[in-house]
Every structure is written in structure tokens, then in C-alpha cells.
Image (cartoon, grey):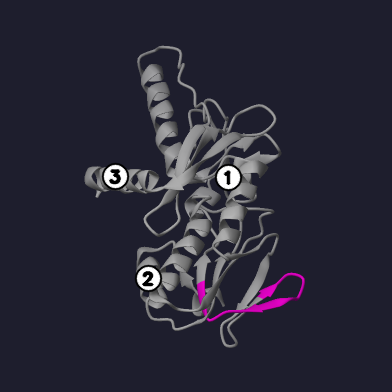
């Protein structure tokens, strides 16, 4: 019932629909739901909650925003310290955080989330991060694991298929703590450069030397014209070392500039 009862904010049409809904709702309860793991962009569910709260507050609408996720805390792949910092920011904005909540079904008729433990939670507007899956072609290629993603070497990005690399969202790359590298554009871009250099070396008869270092960053848009900025080393021994810069207009302007750069280059 997810598609009937909620708005897929990971599609262009859904994002536009969510904006219209937040500008027309007159109260009640707005739920932001992570339907399943993994998903692209670890910051996105938190950003959706922050932006929803900011839009409703500016409109003077008394509505409650709640974030539901199967994760133990926000952005767990970035480490517990960063997750707790984001949880505190959500609390400051009076956004409910319901961690370790795995949804089993969405009852669109009664507007309720049904969790694995049988508990239910009502909503008036549901903003959903949908389940992610790879293409059927990839799942049937012999390269993917049972989850549909492709295990690849953390440094070289090679798969178990000879001469085949996996980068970006399809890749499953282990990091410390029995977790996997987040699926984010900043990593995909860096991985693409590494693989391109390795293929070029192979074509020239040279030993491939390019390696991926696991370093990355992302913005966390919080509405109100401010954003936080996270940066760190996801390959650090023991656990990722990631720092979160305080929310400011500077980081929001940097995020806007970053988006414009990519749109100008690829749109």
C-alpha cells in the first residue's frame, strides 16, 4: 500500500507533489518513512523531515512531523557521534524520531503505518523513501549477491567477474562495523575516476594503480536557508571518522552552487 498511501519523494514527480501537499495541508501528522534498507543518500530522509517542518512552520500550520526508520539513529554509516548530533537537531525542531521501526505494510485506506511488531501509527501525509532495488538485468547477471547488489573491492572496485568493475549505487562495498559504504553521488563520481584510470592503464599495457580512498562529504539541508555539512573518511580503521559542521547559510549557499554546477554540466 506504499504507492497508494504515500508520495515517493525520490522521483521528480513525487518531489513536486510533496511540495504541493506541504503547501496545502492544514494540520495533522506528516510522516517521513524509510521503507527499507539500503537507500540512496543517507541524509535525504532527515532533509525531508527538516524541510517539511520548516515549510509548515513558515505557513503557521500546526502539524507534527515524524521520521520513521529501520536504522538505530540517523545516518548510521557515518558513525554514532554524527547520528546523535543529527538526532539532537531533529529534536530541537520538535521532529519525532522513531528509530528501529521497520514497516511491514501501509494501510492507505485508514492512513496507518503497520510495523513488524504489529504496532500502528497514523498519518495525514506520508512522504516515503521507497524500497531500492537494482535492475533485473544486473540481478540475473551472475555478479550480484542475494540482495541484488554487486560486491566490489573497496580499493580497486573490481568484482568477482574478470575485468568487471562495480561503482555507485549498484556496488556493495564493506566498511568497518559490518556495514557498507553509503550510496551517494559523491562516492560514485570518485569511483568513476578510479575505474576510468584503471581501464586506461590496462589498455596501455600498464599496471593499474588507481584506488578509491573512501572519503566523501554531503550537505544536510535543514530548510530556513541553512544547511549542515558532513565530511570524513569512511574507510577509517575501526569506524568511519566523519565530522558535522554546524548549520549555516554558508553551507546552504554551497549546496545550491554545487547543485547548479551539476545541472549546468549534465542537465
Q: Earlier in the sequence, mark 2 or mark 3?
A: 2
Name the residue rendered at 49%, 23% in the picture.
211
**Circle 2 SS class:** helix
Label placed on residue 144: 1
Picture quarter containing residue 92?
bottom right
Q: Residue furthest left?
A: 264
Could you tell me how many numbered marks the image carries? 3
Q: Position of residue 261 (x, y in %)?
A: 27, 43
Residue 75 shows in the view:
no
Mark 1 or 2, nearer chain start:
2
Residue at 48%, 67% (x, y): give it: 53
Q: What's the mark number on residue 19? A: 2
Residue 86 vertical placement versus 130 (above, below): above
**Quadrant housing the N terminus:** bottom right
Instruction: Give the residue at mark 3.
Output: 257
* Of labels 1 and 3, the one closer to you: 3
Q: Disc 1 on helix, strand or loop? A: loop
Based on the picture, tell me whether residue 182 belongs to the magenta stretch.
Answer: no
* Residue at figure coordinates x 50%, y 55% from the top left: 136
Amino acid at each position: 500500500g506504499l504507492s497508494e498511501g504515500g508520495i515517493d519523494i525520490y522521483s521528480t514527480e513525487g518531489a513536486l507533489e510533496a511540495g504541493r501537499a506541504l503547501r496545502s495541508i492544514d494540520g495533522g501528522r506528516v510522516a517521513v518513512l524509510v521503507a527499507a534498507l539500503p537507500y540512496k543518500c543517507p541524509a535525504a530522509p532527515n532533509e525531508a523531515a527538516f524541510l517539511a517542518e520548516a515549510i509548515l512552520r513558515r505557513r503557521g500550520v500546526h502539524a507534527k512531523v515524524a521520521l520513521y526508520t529501520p536504522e538505530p539513529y540517523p545516518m548510521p554509516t557515518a558513525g554514532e557521534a554524527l547520528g546523535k548530533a543529527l538526532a539532537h537537531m531533529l529534536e530541537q525542531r520538535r521532529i519525532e524520531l522513531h528509530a528501529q521501526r521497520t514497516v511491514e505494510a501501509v494501510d492507505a485506506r485508514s492512513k496507518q503505518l503497520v510495523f513488524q511488531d504489529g504496532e500502528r501509527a497514523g498519518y495525514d501525509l506520508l512522504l516515503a523513501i521507497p524500497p531500492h532495488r537494482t535492475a533485473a538485468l544486473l540481478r540475473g547477471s551472475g555478479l550480484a549477491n542475494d540482495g541484488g547488489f554487486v560486491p566490489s573491492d573497496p580499493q580497486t572496485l573490481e568484482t568477482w567477474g574478470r575485468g568487471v568493475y562495480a561503482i555507485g549505487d549498484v556496488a556493495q562495498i564493506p566498511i568497518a562495523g559490518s556495514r557498507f559504504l553509503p550510496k551517494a553521488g559523491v562516492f560514485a563520481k570518485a569511483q568513476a575516476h578510479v575505474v576510468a584510470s584503471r581501464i586506461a592503464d590496462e589498455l596501455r599495457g600498464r599496471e593499474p594503480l588507481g584506488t578509491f580512498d573512501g572519503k566523501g562529504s554531503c550537505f544536510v539541508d535543514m530548510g530556513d536557508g541553512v544547511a549542515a555539512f558532513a565530511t570524513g573518511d569512511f574507510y577509517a580503521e575501526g569506524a568511519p571518522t566523519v565530522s558535522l559542521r554546524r548549520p549555516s547559510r554558508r553551507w546552504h549557499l554551497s549546496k545550491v552552487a554545487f547543485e547548479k554546477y551539476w545541472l549546468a554540466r549534465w542537465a
